[in-house]
Image: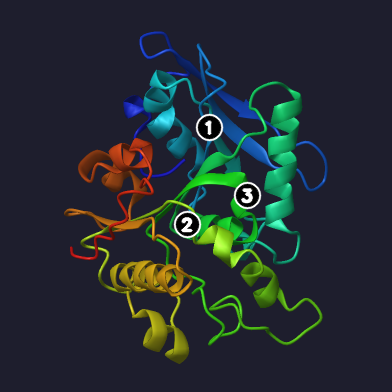
Amino acid sequence: MKNLPKQSLPPAHDTLHGFHIVWRRAHGRNGLACWLAIPHQRRADTPALVAIHGIQRGAEEMARSFAARAAAEGRVVIAPVFDEAGWTGYQRVVQRRRADLALIALLDELALEGLVGKRPFTLFGFSGGAQFAHRFAMLYPHRIDHLIAAAAGWYTLPDRHSVFPYGLGAESGRQAWGPKFGAALDRFLQLPVSVLVGTLDNLPDETTRSTPELDRRQGRDRLTRARTWTRALTQAARARGLEARFRLHTLADCGHRFIDCVRDGGLVDHVFAPPVPLDACTTALAA
């Protein structure tokens, strides 16, 4: 685990806050391992929180960061591990080994074990994990009750002007995933979506994807791209006569480190805030 000193981690069994942390190994060749934060008193009426790491693979850090707040609500935290050796390109969801199907299989296993129910879950992702999260939600909106995309490097826009994964246009090849991601677009646009990004995440770095078309359509940095995507979702929803349930929250004085966003930017508060209700359809686009 990176960036978080061991002495600052919550213990594996936290009696005060009522949870324990569990490492669950992968089952099968294409299975996913995961970190679990399990409350001592689970509530069946609360959605699980699935937290998707970025390319630093900080799944344990996420599970521990969210554990206490989740336990207070009786919610299980599931932090899958897309290891670098087996899951290069997991951010695109359908590349190679199908990261989407691996996550669904993991959730099915946990349901059979009685740890989670079959109800829709809250999906959070940070950086590369936010890329995975928003694309998974586009493909499977019926599985999601609230999408939280934090500090994504770039996005799939909800239009067909660009080919997938930049948009929903059909790319060359047999699969043509763009139209498949667009098939449930109306349902996706009815989800509550929270977009989070640090105010200091406004300069491209060595991990920021850059192409002439991407930079032209979405901007050059994560802050600009978050604004672009939120605005595009809002416009697409309104063009269909749907109420836009999207909010952009900027995290003051935070860059692109997950733990800085947790400690200094109030990220945990945003993750556990109620989703945007249907009768409060406002989109905050200002920093």
**Label 3: how many residues lie within 10 Å, few (<14), some (14-19) or many (20+)?**
some
**Circle 1 sits on which residue?**
47
**Label 2: how many residues lie within 10 Å, few (<14), some (14-19) or many (20+)?**
many
- Going by the numbered disc 2, the residue's amino acid type is Ala
**Label 1: how many residues lie within 10 Å, few (<14), some (14-19) or many (20+)?**
many
- Going by the numbered disc 1, the residue's amino acid type is Pro
**Label 2 to label 1: alpha-carbon separation:** 19 Å
Q: Earlier in the sequence, mark 1 or mark 3?
A: 1
The percent position of residue 84, horizontal first and vertical second, equals 62, 55
Q: Callout 2: helix, strand or loop?
A: helix
Q: Do residues under tags 1 and 3 come within 8 Å of each other at their CB atoms?
A: no
User: What quarter of the picture does the C terminus occupy?
Assistant: bottom left
**Circle 2 sits on which residue?**
130
Residue at 46% across, 89% down:
213
**Label 2 to label 3: alpha-carbon separation:** 18 Å
Q: Earlier in the sequence, mark 2 or mark 3?
A: 2
Mark 1 against mark 3, which lies toward the viewer? 3
**Circle 3 sits on which residue?**
142
254 w.r.t. 50: above or below: below
Residue at 52% across, 49% down:
57
Residue at 57% across, 59% down:
187
The percent position of residue 132, horizontal first and vertical second, equals 56, 58
Give the quadrant of residue 207: bottom left
269 relative position to 167: left or right? left
